[in-house]
Amino acid sequence: MDRRFATIGVYGFTAGAFMERLVGEGVGLLLDLRQRRGVRGPDYAWANSVRLQGALAAADIGYRHVKELAPTTELRRLQYREDDRQGVGKRNRVALAPEYTERYTREILDPFDLGVLVAELPGDSVTVLLCVERDPEACHRSLVAARVRAEHGLPVADLRPC
């Protein structure tokens, strides 16, 4: 079996470019790691759950919400406070706060059985981990991807807008 993973964010993509990238990479399943499956503003309305699922279905790409891997509201607020302290907006963040990383790992990632999730995934296509941030280093999806690499030896590519 040739399981492959990738990560992708919403910011920086148009709806068309996002779908083209998924199809071009051979994505068969998108795992939505967002707590709230919406994005503010008209530029990213296409990424709201219902619209996104419709576009994925039209492209024959599966969709699964993995809310158990989404950060809690408390953790998101912790990161927002750090963003404010550093004077960066959510859409411009380049790294996660160390406390956020530690707590996300301990409170969410460690208790989650990633092995069960990986075993259920298709082996003949790419599975992509989705959140909103443009850069994976600024998003919890990078922590999930690192765990997939470390514990399951699977390659993970980061898909970024061109």
Image (cartoon, helix red, strand yellow):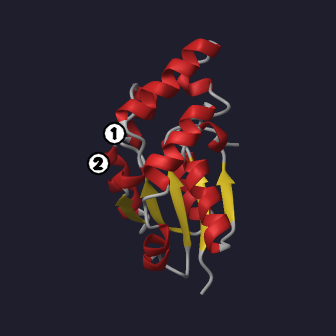
The spot of residue 153 in percent (x, y) is 68, 73
Q: Nearer the viewer, residue 120 or 54?
A: 120
**Is residue 92 in sight in this rendering?**
yes
The spot of residue 4 in percent (x, y) is 62, 71
Q: Which residue is mark 1?
A: 36
Q: Earlier in the sequence, mark 2 or mark 1?
A: 1
| Helix, strand or loop at mark 2 | helix
Please determine whether, in this image, residue 48 is positioned above or below residue 54. above
Q: Quadrant of residue 73?
A: top left
Q: Residue at x 62, y 24 (%)?
A: 92
Please name which of the two marks, 2 or 1, marks the residue nearer to the observer: 1
Does 56 sit left or right of 140 as displayed?
Answer: left
Answer few, some or many: residues within 10 Å of disc 1's Cα (few below 14, many 20 plus, some between 14 and 19). some
| Helix, strand or loop at mark 1 | loop
Kind of residue sitting beneath label 2? Val
Q: Nearer the viewer, residue 92 or 11?
A: 92
Q: Residue at x 39, y 27 (%)?
A: 40
Q: Residue at x 54, y 35 (%)?
A: 100
Question: Which residue in the rendered view is the most extreme toward the bottom?
Answer: 1
Q: Which residue is mark 2?
A: 50
The spot of residue 151 in percent (x, y) is 62, 69
Answer few, some or many: residues within 10 Å of disc 2's Cα (few below 14, many 20 plus, some between 14 and 19). few
Kind of residue sitting beneath label 1? Arg
